[in-house]
Image: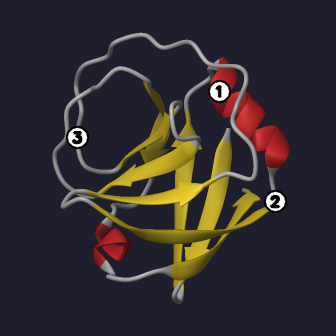
Amino acid sequence: MKFRMTFDGHVMTATLHDNLSARELLGMLPLDLTIGDYSTNEKIAYLPRKLTEIRDEPFGGERPGDIAYYAPWGNLVFYYASYRYSKGLIRLGRFDQGFEPLLTRGDHPLRIDPA
């Protein structure tokens, strides 16, 4: 399960885990969203509606390049620096070729397509 993400001239591909939330997200594609900075370690994008197929289970092995869904707010999270699991965070997958484009500052139109 893969998707392609395009913003500010950058193209990134990701491999998603085989879980309920990731499958539901893939079913929503293609999506036109806005990606923006949040905190000091992530970019976020709000989905048009919250995912319903979620199973909030603690996980470990957190690292930059992870993609997650934050259920309380209904947003996708793209990590470019270290982070820790918190309640409501569902890991969806990982970028295939690094995460450096996420260091681009500011808000940008974002397109997510199936790959």
Amino acid beneath label 2? Pro
From mark 2 to mark 3, how far is it between C-alphas?
Answer: 26 Å
Left/right of residue 104 with respect to residue 108 in the rendered view:
left
Which residue position holds label 2? 30
Residue drawn where x is 28% and y is 74% of the image: 103
Amino acid beneath label 1? Ser
Which residue position holds label 1? 21
What percent of the width, then of the height, locates residue 81? 19, 54
Is the residue 27 above or below the residue 59 in the image? Answer: below
Q: What is the secondary structure assignment of the residue under circle 3? A: loop
What percent of the width, then of the height, locates residue 58? 34, 12
Residue drawn where x is 75% and y is 53% of the image: 48
Which residue position holds label 3? 63
Tell me the tag on residue 85: none
Q: What is the secondary structure assignment of the residue under circle 1? A: helix
What percent of the width, then of the height, locates residue 3? 66, 53
Left/right of residue 108 with respect to residue 2 in the rendered view:
left
From mark 2 to mark 1, how far is it between C-alphas?
Answer: 16 Å
Q: What is the secondary structure assignment of the residue under circle 2? A: loop
User: Which image quadrant for residue 83?
Assistant: top left
Residue drawn where x is 24% and y is 59% of the image: 39
Q: How many marks?
A: 3
Residue drawn where x is 73% and y is 30% of the image: 23
